Image: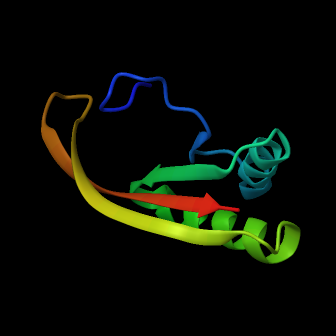
Amino acid sequence: MTSENGSVETNVIYIGKKVTMSYVLAVITQFNQGAESVVIKARGKTISKAVDVSEIVKNKFVNTLRVEKINISTEEITTENNTPMKVSAIEIILAK
């Protein structure tokens, strides 16, 4: 995935169907490898899991982290039968 300026996005965790602790481990791993911030991204039904991941990491594992910024948006995706559908999205930025 590339960002607006064309550089490759690093330290981004996309929330999907795995169990919550898989994503918690991924975020902790990013910080242990020297990341100053980690972006947690989710859409639709996984938004609540993204919030859970950020709170678990912040409150149980790395108490020095803070939520730097939260971005919310609506994205338009195309369904399997080629109809457009709007879906909510969240981006939670955790920083040291």
Q: Is 52 situated above or below 32?
A: below
Is residue 50 or residue 34 the one in the foreground? 34
Counting from the top left corner in percent of width and height, residue 55 is at 68, 73
Q: Position of residue 9 (x, y in %)?
A: 50, 31
Depth check, front residue: 85 or 53: 53
Location of residue 12 (image quadrant): top right
The C terminus: image quadrant: bottom right
Taking depth in this image into account, of 48 and 95 the one nearest to the observer is 95
Question: Residue 22 at what x, y percent from top left?
Answer: 77, 47
**How many numbered marks does the figure carry?**
0
Reply above or below: 78 against 96: above
51 relative to 83 in the view: left or right = right
Question: Which of 32/23 is in front?
Answer: 32
Residue at 82% x, 38% y is: 33
Residue at 49% over, 50% down: 41
Rendered view: 33 above or below 51? above
Pick out the residue farthest to the left: 83
Where, quadrant-wise, is the N terminus in this rendering? top left
In the rendered image, which quarter is residue 56 located in? bottom right
Q: Give left or right: position of 23 versus 10.
A: right
- Viewed as shown, does residue 85 lie left or right of 24? left
Q: Residue at x 74, y 71 (%)?
A: 58
According to the image, what is the colour scheme of the structure? Answer: rainbow
For the point 65% across and 66% down, the residue is 54
- Whether 73 is drawn above or below 26: the answer is below
Question: Residue 18: x percent and y percent?
Answer: 68, 45
